[in-house]
Amino acid sequence: MKNWRKHLLSPYVVMSIAAIAYIIKFCLKYGVGQWVNSPALIADGYHNFADLIEVGLVMFFGIYLGNKPRSAEYPMGRKRLESIIVLGIGIALVVLAYDTTTKSLSGLISLWPNLDESIRPHLPSFIFPPVENPIISESAFIGVLCAAGISAIISMIIGRYEIVCGKKAGMVSLIADGQETISDGKIEIAAFIGFLSKFGLIFLFGSTFPIAIPIIGGIIEYALGLFVAYLVIKTAWEILGNAFHVLLAKSIGTNKVETIRAIVKKIPGIRAVTDITSFSDGHTATCLISVETAASSKAHRPLWRTIKKQVKEYLSQFEEFMGQTVHVYFQQPEYPFMREAQALILDNDGREMNSPTIESATHMRIYDMDGEHHRLRAVDIKIKNLPLSEFIDLIQYKSIKSVFVFTGSDEERRSCEHVGIHYELNTLIRPYIHSRLNSAHL
Amino acid sequence: MTDFHTATQKMLTEMQTAIQMITLLSIRKPGELKYARSMASTLNLPISLFTGNNELPNEAKNWPDLSAMQSQRLQMALPGIQVISSLDHLHGSIIISNSVARKETGGHRDRNLIVLAPQDESGFDPHEKKKIMIPFGRLDTFLKCLPLALAIAKQTDSTLVFFHTTRPEPTCSSNDWHDHMVANARETESFIVTICSELNINHEIIITSVYPKVIAEGVAEAALQNGCHLIIMAVADEVVFGSHTEQVLNYSPTPTLIVV
């Protein structure tokens, strides 16, 4: 049972069933069109034949080529081919809506012969097509009605089936084709109702009200045509919009991106989210996330998996994203190199104290620092009895940017600041912690 | 059951005296000071900063007030932080330091310290429900850190997430990782259930297999994915080289508290 369901949801099976449905519709419309000698029905049959070709295009470009795995030549895959197909389907729907609109408007105006005569000669036939008013027998009426009704039912069922399977498989071309088939179905329903109202009323009351009945039937038929054209153009707008969003790699939305930023920022070890580039590739949301972390390289893998999992969980809440792809890039914080010196009084027994001034110091402790006062290394240099001028030369030679003392002196401050070195008062001695633990015999 | 009862009573006594202070041995990174402040306010504990023994060097005898002046200025610079010159109280206090944590798990472990490596985090979010992960395996190692974990959980109203990773047992065909656990780990699990229900502490138990990943990586990942704010681990006494705790420090960006 499960296997059957799996097979029925396969895109190739769906498109094959859709192709069979189009063949049935073509045969039905073409055959009945020939029988009642209706060019409109024959043309609609050819439209279904064009749909059959479209199914072939969707199968080859959308399903076969579009689903080929990523390669060195196509690092992002060929999924966007589907969007080109979708674009084509959208354009086809616009043409269909245009055709329905012009025919319905032309038909509607033809109900008032005086108005029709004043407009028709001034407009070309592609804007104002000629109106066909077939005069058909009762048996032909039943035939046409059956052809329109069966086609409408087939279109609605197949369209729905394509959309469901397309959503399951995450294939936009399949969904778009389903939407187009449903639009066809709506037109066929409109034609069915229009035909039924027009000829049904004629057969029932035509002899009693010979002038009013054809006008009422015509108004119902063409007004329905205009309404369906509006529905079709709405669908086309949606389909074209989606295709353009994919082809132009539109972001998944500022709010969603900001939520993702907040989710990622909250994960321990992430200092900042430096960049999020997002776009939807068909029904797959893709996020390229760059994060800044000071965590060790070993921590990158757990972080990478956690970011991916949490972002995917968030995106899976949205119906429009049937798939999620998340790429994470790690950046180490950039540390501007800095060197500081501290004047200290040290003795041979390991006792140490901040020196009030440079003059009173026995040693200078030099720290290599990163931008966050994180000491990278420290070294003690003996400076006892070193004249101030030589001390200044030494710290300039060592590229030291700041000197710390406990109380300070004006002369030392002037000398340091004269050569662009900060002279600051400091309270804490910053020795190696380990030496402290060891000295405390812990 | 009697054993459990005795152990629980012992645990309760140990819990009450588990920690009394947060200690900074130095302010190596501003983040460590921030974390210490946040931890102290969450656990309602004082912070102390060790400034050395304050004995004047021979060369500084001309400035007899120097030591007092230094302490005074420190108090002004770091309000609310107690300046200490002796490390006698270090047992029973949490040392906040990434570097000490790394050193103490890697080398000789005869110091009996509690060290918290804040990693790159700056503290607990006071508005967030806290989760603390405790990886467990053998009961004896686990018992070293449990009183501390219970004390912190009780104080902060946190949920304890007990995490165990097991290797797939070749003779066991079950898909439930619980069935692959070794006897020692099962014993620990029963102990957890008993003690947490007796002390009325919220807890979750996660039994999984991180195989073929490194265990420490699995622990780090589980802590991140379960939204844990702290990992508490003990270093096994007989491990001489390459403990899981040492590895967790390298793999995990989540702050990790270690009982050495």
Image (cartoon, coloured by chain):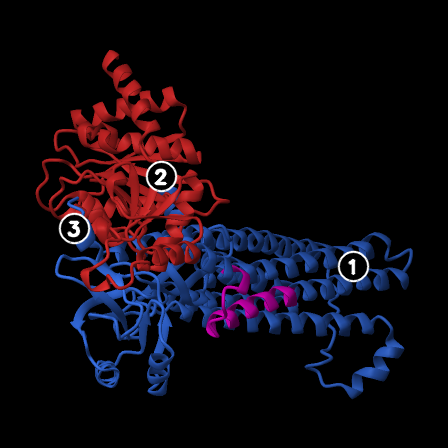
Chain colours: A blue, B red
The answer to whether any part of residue A269 appears in the image is no
The amino acid type, in three-letter code, at marker 2 is: Ile
Checking the image for residue B132, the label placed there is 2
* Residue A8 located left or right of residue B115: right
Foreground tag (1 vs 3): 3
Mark 1 → mark 3, Cα distance in angstroms = 105 Å
> Which one is nearer the viewer's eye here, B69 or A176?
B69
Residue located at (46% from left, 60% from top): A261
Q: Residues within 10 Å of mark 2 (few under 14, many from 20)?
A: many
The answer to whether any part of residue B248 appears in the image is yes
Instruction: Please provide the residue range marked out in magenta.
Output: A232-256
Q: Quadrant of residue B169?
A: top left
**Residue A229 is covered by the magenta coloring:** no
Foreground tag (2 vs 1): 2
Tag 3 residue? A439
The amino acid type, in three-letter code, at marker 1 is: Lys
Tag 1 residue? A198
Under circle 1, the secondary element is helix
Looking at the figure, which quarter contains the C terminus of chain B? top left
> Which one is nearer the viewer's eye here, B141 or A119?
B141
